Amino acid sequence: MGNLLISIYNYFEKHNLAFKVFAFSLFAGMGYFAFKINLEEDITKVLPKDIKITKVNDVIQKSKFLDKLTVLISLKDTSQNALPDSLISFADAFVSKGETTSRLHSKNQLQGR
C-alpha cells in the first residue's frame, strides 16, 4: 500500500498538469454532488412511523408556540434582590429595541410581556 501511494506521489510530482486536472475534476465532482444534497427542515420525517410518535408530531406541527421565542430576564447575581420595576423597564427597553430591529429583518410582530 505504501509503495502504491509513493508511486502516485512520484507520478504527480513529474506530471504537474495531470495533478491539477485531477484535483480540479475531484473538487468539481464533490461540488456537483454537494449541490445535489437536499436538506429537510422537518425532522419528524426521520422518526419511525408509530401511532404515538405521529400524534406527538401532529401536536407539535399545529402548535403556534413553535414560531415564538421566549426570553427570561433576571439578574446575573442571584444573591441580590431584584427590583421588579427595574426588570420591567429593562424588558420594555429590550422589546422596543427588538421591535426596531425586527422591522428591518422580518414582517412578524414582537410581543412584550
Image: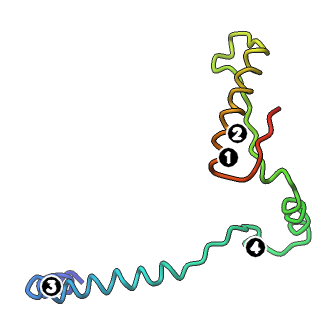
Three-letter code, disc 3: Phe
Give the labeled residue for mark 4. 45
User: CA separation, marks 3 and 4?
Assistant: 46 Å
Q: Residue, x 67% and y 45% (percent of image)?
A: 102
Q: Position of residue 12 (x, y in %)?
A: 15, 85
Front residue of 48/24: it is 24
CB within 8 Å, label 2 to label 4? no
Image coloring type = rainbow
- Tag of residue 103: 1
In the depicted structure, whether residue 17 falls above or below residue 78: below
Front residue of 75/51: it is 75
Instruction: Determine the secondary structure under disc 1.
Output: helix
Three-letter code, disc 1: Arg
| Earlier residue among tags 4 and 1 | 4
- Tag of residue 12: 3
Q: Position of residue 54 (x, y in %)?
A: 88, 69
Instruction: Determine the secondary structure under disc 4.
Output: helix
Splitting the image into 4 quarters, where does residue 70 fall?
Answer: top right
Splitting the image into 4 quarters, where does residue 49 fall?
Answer: bottom right
| Earlier residue among tags 2 and 4 | 4
Closer to viewer: mark 2 or mark 4: 2
Q: Is disc 2 surrounded by few (<14), some (14 to 19) or many (20+) residues within 10 Å?
A: some
In the depicted structure, whether residue 49 falls above or below residue 55: below
In the depicted structure, whether residue 13 falls above or below residue 106: below
In the depicted structure, whether residue 46 falls above or below residue 89: below
Splitting the image into 4 quarters, where does residue 80 fall?
Answer: top right
Give the labeled residue for mark 2. 99
